[in-house]
Amino acid sequence: MKRILLNTKISKIYIISVILITLLLLTSYFSYAMFTVTKEKSNAISIVTGTLSYDLKVDGVSTDKLVVGPKTSKTFTITLSNPNTRIARFNLYYKGSLNQNIEAGYIIDCESIKPPAVTGVNLEAVGAIGSSETYKLVITNKGSEEETVTLGVSVGLDYNNLSLENDQYLFNEYTNEPNAPELDTNMIAVKYVDNNWVKADISNTNNDWYNYNEQKWANAVTVSSSTRENYKNASVGTIVNMNDIETMWVWIPRYSYSIASEDGTNYYGKQGEYLTTTPTQELPGEIDVKFVASGEKDRCSAKYKAGEEITSWYTPDAFTFGDEELSGIWVGKFETSSSNPDAEYGGGNTTSLDPMIKPNAISWRGNSIANIFNISIKMNDNGNRYGFTNNVDTHAMKSSEWGAVTYLTQSKYGKLGNTNYSGSDKEVYQNKSEEYITGCSWGHPGGGTGYDFGCQYTYDIDINGTGASTTGNIYGIYDMVGCSHEFMMGNYNDVTINSGFSSMPDAKYYDKYTSDDTVTACNGGLCKSYYLSEIAHWYNDFYATVNSDIPWIICGSNYYYPDGSIEPLTPGIFWYSTDKGTDDTYHDRSFRIVISP
């Protein structure tokens, strides 16, 4: 009897155990949210309750909505964290109501931003328990309406394959493409065909308008009011008559740069594929450039050892205009001339004339820097002759904007990268016209022993003439070496002296230097992107710093200085000196105009 009772108890225990195990298996099969079986490296089996989660912040705020205006690029700082007690795998994706108008990618900068370990798919760098990673995402809205982009995260265990719905898109790796030029309403895109400027296709299909990889910078013009509507309505390919053109412009897209050192001490750029010799002060090398969206702003040393990965970038100050971050700037293609070129000094000391920007014209000289400032800003006044609207800001060139042009020139996108030139001819050629004719070329860089002044080659003569542009072809900017000295809106400590200013203009219109020492001139520090200190003496170009007696900067030298008047320093694109701000002595100071869209 005792034996039977014992067997009965064992049977009951066995039956109950089977039922419990069966229920457990059924429950785990039907409810992944309640019970998840995971495999560790030890092959042990553990049971985890609950679903996997994530923590997503945009610019420090918990949100998944990104608003981007029409035809705008914005950069957002994204932080993605793994709050789980499990190793996880993540997909970060985006979704927009107008997906065909959205492009999105991540970028790397020099501060603490890191790319996904596996580009755009599994963000494995975030997968560790309690880990957190920060990314910068660029959202470009190509449409004409404001777009709200929704971020999303799919998450699973480290061995799960993650998928996306049809209308969800992964972020792509950042592509180094220049921001599209921003044309004001009455600006006309042009390209050069068969010795003529013709209307270009602004969609840039097949690089019809611009291609910075081939040193083809975007060009645009304004025309006389009597011909404006005809050209605006004309078909692509229509010749734009030079007699109808009043101003010519070149687009400098927003970028960041870094300067290499081949020896770890001297930062003369990298040798790369465009020089056959090690860079020196006399023949410097390539400045590395990456194009960036208007929301991206690097702020690091912009120095690195050649051959190593570039992790330090700087965005030139030229692309910050007051509190606006610009996608690029339009720069006058030539030194400014006047609406009365027969006037003394091509225009003289007056504000009654209108600026023109054309080749084969007499550079406007003999003006005070205050007059230059006023002439430039009134170009977009209501009813102006050029058709400019209040969507743009025309102003006299700042020294930081000159710097943005020179650095791009010394990159693979500028004359340095043009394979039609080698050795010392990589330097921009000098304009040695003693009559101050815009667009002329000597056919050689500044210096040497040549006293043969004149307009040896016009701007449209291939190589000998176009060598005086910042690209080495007709699409670049001219007169940045020679012709006239150019006044810059760069000033020492708000000293107005004889400039004609009773007080300094709004801070966004000029660069302020607080010291006569180039190491501390920019608010106690080095002047990055201004050519004042980082690249001083490159190509042996002369420089002199501003001070309280001569507080204004002039750039580019003039037509003279044939053999380096201050040996061994020569004229060049990195040449700069100082002035009192009034051109009543030499009458060889001109100016250049910039558009901030």
Image: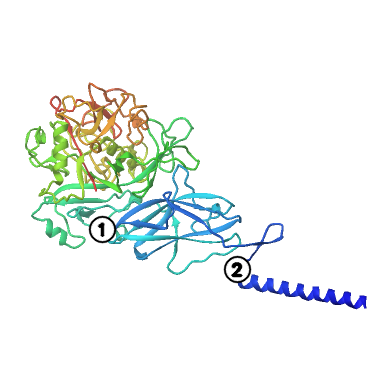
Q: Quadrant of residue 446?
A: top left
Q: Position of residue 121 (x, y in %)?
A: 51, 59
Vertical placement of residue 169 versus 589, above or below: below
The answer, for residue 439, to whether it is visible in the render is no
- Which residue does the image show at 18% across and 59% down from the upper left? 238
Q: How is the image coloured?
A: rainbow
- Residue 27 on image: x %, y %: 64, 72
Q: Which residue is mark 1?
A: 202
Residue 132 makes an appearance in the image: yes
N-term mark: 2 or 1: 2
Q: Is residue 591 left or right of residue 76?
A: left
489 or 430, which lies in front? 489
Q: Nearer the viewer, residue 543 or 529?
A: 529
What mark, if any, has residue 364 been given in the picture?
none
Q: Secondary structure at mark 1?
A: loop
Q: Residue at 18% of width from left, 51% of height from top?
A: 221
Residue 133 spot, x, y in % from top left: 51, 49
Circle 2 residues within 10 Å: few <14, some 14–19, many ≥20: some
Classify mark 2: helix, strand or loop.
Answer: loop
Residue extending farthest to the top is: 549
10 to the left or right of 573 = right
Q: CA distance from mark 2 to mark 1?
A: 54 Å
Residue 50 drawn at (x, y percent): 59, 62
Q: For the image shown, how many numbered marks are present on the structure?
A: 2
**Disc 2 designates what residue?**
32
